[in-house]
Amino acid sequence: NAGVTQTPKFQVLKTGQSMTLQCAQDMNHNSMYWYRQDPGMGLRLIYYSASEGTTDKGEVPNGYNVSRLNKREFSLRLESAAPSQTSVYFCASSEGPTDTQYFGPGTRLTVL
Amino acid sequence: AQSVTQLGSHVSVSEGALVLLRCNYSSSVPPYLFWYVQYPNQGLQLLLKYTTGATLVKGINGFEAEFKKSETSFHLTKPSAHMSDAAEYFCAVSVKTTDSWGKLQFGAGTQVVVTP
């Protein structure tokens, strides 16, 4: 099992460009999450999906959109990237809302 | 809403010495508590978790943590540090309510450096 995979691993964007971060899990988990990690701030939840077909906002959703494409895949889209979105983005999945979350390796995004 | 405070953003320990990482939480309902570890350029990996039952929880790599409700703490310890323990450690809390729905709230992290 690959667990949680994310693509791309690295990305550099210019302000105003758009991109989609991809996440897939092969553990048949119901719940999936997107976090961003910034120095000294831990991880902050951007969006989550309790189950296939549902999505909801987390702590810092502004500037992002998500799609739960199917049970395996959960994508994060930046429509118009800003320098404040420079961060490391992690996708995670869990069996249910209070179960252990398993994290992907992260995407390092720089917005110039 | 729940929150997590990790005391000390950086901790330096000698190889073979005790590792103690402090975590305090606030929650109005019984919490689920987690410790995650992040090695350089990797994702987070679960060390251990407390949900209910025994308050002393043992995890991977010789780590353990004790849930103390009266102190609202969940400190992480390891009796003898190894060079491979150098990493960043995150404490997290989750509660099962209609508002919070099990969302993980992370602390800011503690970077552990192990010196020979």
Image (tube, helix red, strand yellow):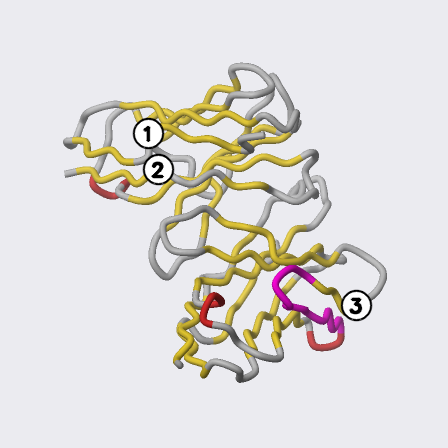
Mark seen at residue A107: 2
Position in image of residue A71 (x %, y %): 60, 19
**Secondary structure type for disc 3:** loop
User: On the image, numbered disc 1 is attached to which residue?
Assistant: A8
Q: Quadrant of residue A18?
A: top left
The amino acid type of the residue labelled 1 equals Pro
Mark seen at residue B55: 3
Contact? badges 3 and 2 (CB < 8 Å): no
Contact? badges 2 and 1 (CB < 8 Å): yes
Position in image of residue B3 (x %, y %): 57, 60
Q: Do marks 1 and 3 share a subunit? A: no
The magenta stretch spans which residues?
A: B59-69
- Where is B9 relative to A32, above or below? below
Position in image of residue B1 (x %, y %): 61, 54
How far is the residue under mark 1 from the one under mark 3?
40 Å
Position in image of residue A92 (x %, y %): 53, 37
How far is the residue under mark 3 from the one under mark 2?
36 Å
Query: Is B67 colored magenta in this rendering?
Result: yes
Q: Do marks 2 and 1 share a subunit? A: yes
Residue at mark 3: chain = B
Tell me the residue at 34%/44% (across/down).
A88
Tell me the residue at 51%/69% (across/down).
B6
Tell me the residue at 73%/46% (across/down).
B96
Q: Do marks 3 and 2 share a subunit? A: no
**Secondary structure type for disc 2:** strand
Q: Nearer the viewer, residue A26 or B70?
A: A26
Query: Is A1 colored magenta in this rendering?
Result: no
- Where is A36 relative to B15, above or below? above
